[in-house]
Amino acid sequence: MKKRIAIFISGRGSNMEAILKQVKEGILKDVCEVALVFSNKPTAKGLAVAEKYGVPTAVIPSKGKNRADFEREVIELLKPYRVDYIVLAGFMRILSPLFVRAYKNRIINIHPADTNQFKGVGAYEWAFENKLAETKITVHFVDEGVDTGPIIAQRTVDLRGATTLEEVEKRGLKVEHQFYSEALKKVFSGEFNRQNQE
């Protein structure tokens, strides 16, 4: 049975679009369906992209709101959609324990670094400033910490010869867009072993 997912975005949604393509005609076609694309920003460009794919969208602005109040609103919004998993694709907010517990072991994130080496924002800048020959993209479950959840899969990005931050980001995103869907497929198809996460 296909898993129902909600994709959370805050901006242009390039990873979201890559996932939508794979759901429509690629490796995710038989394992999941996108019930909703959600954003905490009404101006997120990815909302228009999702609508082009015929996917329902919803917005609850987070700006100026108490974190707990905002997250309770989102939890209520999600209820009718009966989602099995939440997929974070450039969602620029740290989720509180309240939200994480509501969807325990069912929130997945992509992080543009090895989470054992670098957590939080600015991962590509970190790789560039440290002149790394390679970095790793990590897909992981979200727990109550920041980028501390169980790792689902990692993929190396070759950074040799990259002389600008833009080039580092470009190479990283190219890997992200393919790799995220591959990792999601492992989870949704039951191929990924979850027994160590409880």
Image (spheres, grey):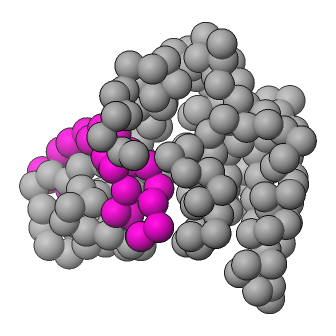
The answer to whether 77 is drawn above or below residue 193 in the figure is below
**Left or right of 160, for residue 186:** right
Q: x%, y% of residue 107?
A: 55, 49
Magenta part of the protein: which range?
138-163
Q: Nearer the viewer, residue 190 or 180?
A: 190
Task: Please identify the quarter of the rendering in which residue 133 is found.
Answer: bottom left
Residue at 71% x, 24% y: name it.
Answer: 33
**Left or right of 21, for residue 163:** left
Residue 95 magenta-drawn? Answer: no
Residue at 14% x, 73% y: name it.
Answer: 130
Q: Nearer the viewer, residue 170 or 150?
A: 150
Task: Please identify the quarter of the rendering in which residue 118 is found.
Answer: bottom left
Q: x%, y% of residue 178?
A: 43, 31
Residue at 47% x, 67% y: name it.
Answer: 144
The quadrant the N terminus occupies is top right
Residue at 41% x, 70% y: name it.
Answer: 146
Residue 139 magenta-drawn? Answer: yes
Residue closest to the far front: 198
Look at the image and tell me whether residue 95 can be seen. yes
Q: x%, y% of residue 136?
A: 24, 50
The answer to whether 124 is drawn above or below residue 79 in the figure is below
Q: x%, y% of residue 24?
A: 68, 18
**Left or right of 121, for residue 11:** right
